[in-house]
Amino acid sequence: MEMTQYAKNPIMPGFYPDPSVCAVGEDFYLVNSTFAYFPGLPVLHSRDLVHWEQIGNVMERASQLPLAHAGHSQGLFAPTIRYHQGTFYVICTNVSYGGNFVVTAESPEGPWSEPHYLEGAGGIDPSLFFDTDGKCYYIGTHPNPEGCRYDGDWYIWIQELDLQTWKLTGEHRDVWNGALKGVHWPEGPHLYKRGDYYYLMHAEGGTGPEHAVTICRSWSVWGPYENCFCNPILTHRHLGQAYPIKYVGHADLIETPAGEWYMTMLAVRPTEGYTTLGRETFLARVTWENGWPVVNAGVGKLTEMVEIHLPKWLPEQDPDSFTSRSRGKNAVPGSSRVYDFTRIEALGDEFLYLRNPEPSHYIWEAGKGLYLVPTSVTLKEQDSPSYVGIRQQHHRFRMEATLELPESAEGCRAGLALIQSNEYHLRLEASGHKLQAILCEKGQDSLAGELPLPEGENHLQLYLQVNGLKASVGYLAAGREVPAAEALDIRSLSTEVAGGFVGCCAGIYAVTEQESAGQRVLFSRLSYTAQ
């Protein structure tokens, strides 16, 4: 059995930020932030850290995940996934509703429980640690209790958590405020035990260019914690603004059954200085020297390929995998894919809605496809428009959609959208008579291109072609492109311009100025092709 193979970074391309990972026997499970998208917190599974499958989402019910009117980069922040004595735990923050909570499941595929909200657990980026004596500890963040001397003057704190009552109990202790002097934003903490030491690993410097991974250790959960003399143990902030991989931080550690260690973390891959894919999940090897972790020894930074010493595992060939059992319901992360809506009855778990979708606005009809019910809610509102999409996972890709507008299409528009946020997105809208390319920046629409549609033609094939920071949109006639706009500058759909914590998603949507019963837009096919 092949034991040496190579994982290609990023292992989860596109909008997969704030990764947390846990190992259960020979299986590895990864979760990521989703902010205002629904369902929340994708669950990825692998047995070799090279090949991954999505096996579900943690927060898939509206009762678990209220997102009404949440800002695009609000909602669910950084989750942590852990396993203890037959139960999976995910702890996370819904910054828009309820704060910090824990959900549990007997299987990582779900179903996951309703949230247990934690009273008195302020801050963000919570984590859980299960000690060898069975006790569970909550690791959190909050502002300096003596008063913040500057923005980001925070502390990491620890308190025992009673899993029977879901109450914090006993002593609350501030244990660490960062490895470096005057550090900003010590956050994303995770606690581990190796040998006789407790290790507290966390992020520093904010989630942008100064992001870093640092670590400290103690003989006791409660400290005092000693600083690693090699901190930060991983960062790219010293490599300059032109380096192709930036913002490295927010890490988590796993140990394989063979006793090897690996680290997941987030980073970005800008194009010409602009990040449209968002924060992605990367992987690195970890060795231990003098009781401290060393990341990518001899290199000291992330690498394109990561050597993995685990048996090769292909989910599509494993009869016990979720991929096999679900008959390929979910697309392989990072892959090209074609969705023939005439042949499927439900969307894969990789699809995302904005905030809490209204199920009656998405209707399947066997042999025909997926109907979107247009409403007056636009993509510019902090609401839930008739929209569903997937993450952009490549700097260059092409999306095509086949749709049929209703015969009574008065006021109805439908098409494709590339979305960074409510205020920054690109829309390709077909109405009864014309096709328009609209670029929204700072919440203001500008017409980037327009052309008439063939008279009486309500069956259309639209395309969106993205090449780095340029986009072209239009429709296909007899296989020939008829562009509405070409080489549009979309650098505004980047973190550097639009801000926030998300990457771009691309998908289908419908909107109308005159809501009327029975008005529906039929989508029969959607494709995403990496280039």
Image (cartoon, helix red, strand yellow):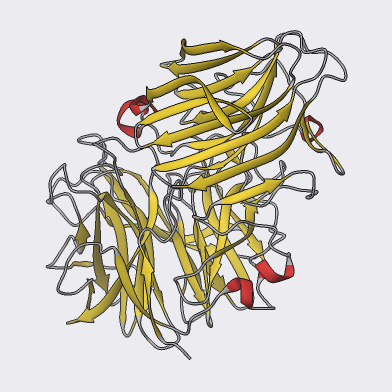
Which residue appears farthest toward the bottom when viewing the image? 1
Q: Is residue 342 visible?
A: yes
Question: In front: 102, or 399?
Answer: 399
Q: Residue 249 in the image: x percent, y percent?
A: 30, 54
Q: Residue at x 73, y 65 (%)?
A: 327
Question: In front: 361, or 521?
Answer: 521
Q: Residue 29 in the image: x percent, y percent?
A: 53, 67
Q: Is residue 322 left or right of residue 484?
A: right
Question: In front: 445, or 206?
Answer: 445
Q: Residue at x 51, y 31 (%)?
A: 418
How many numbered discs sit on the rendered protein? 0
- Looking at the rendering, which quadrant does residue 232 occupy? bottom left
Q: Is residue 120 visible?
A: no
Q: Residue at x 12, y 46 (%)?
A: 240
Q: Residue 297 in the image: x percent, y percent?
A: 19, 74
Question: In front: 337, or 98?
Answer: 337
Q: Residue at x 38, y 26 (%)?
A: 490
Q: Residue 521 in the image: x percent, y percent?
A: 76, 25
Q: Is residue 459 placed above or below 15 in the rendered structure?
A: above
Q: Is residue 50 placed above or below 61 in the rendered structure?
A: below
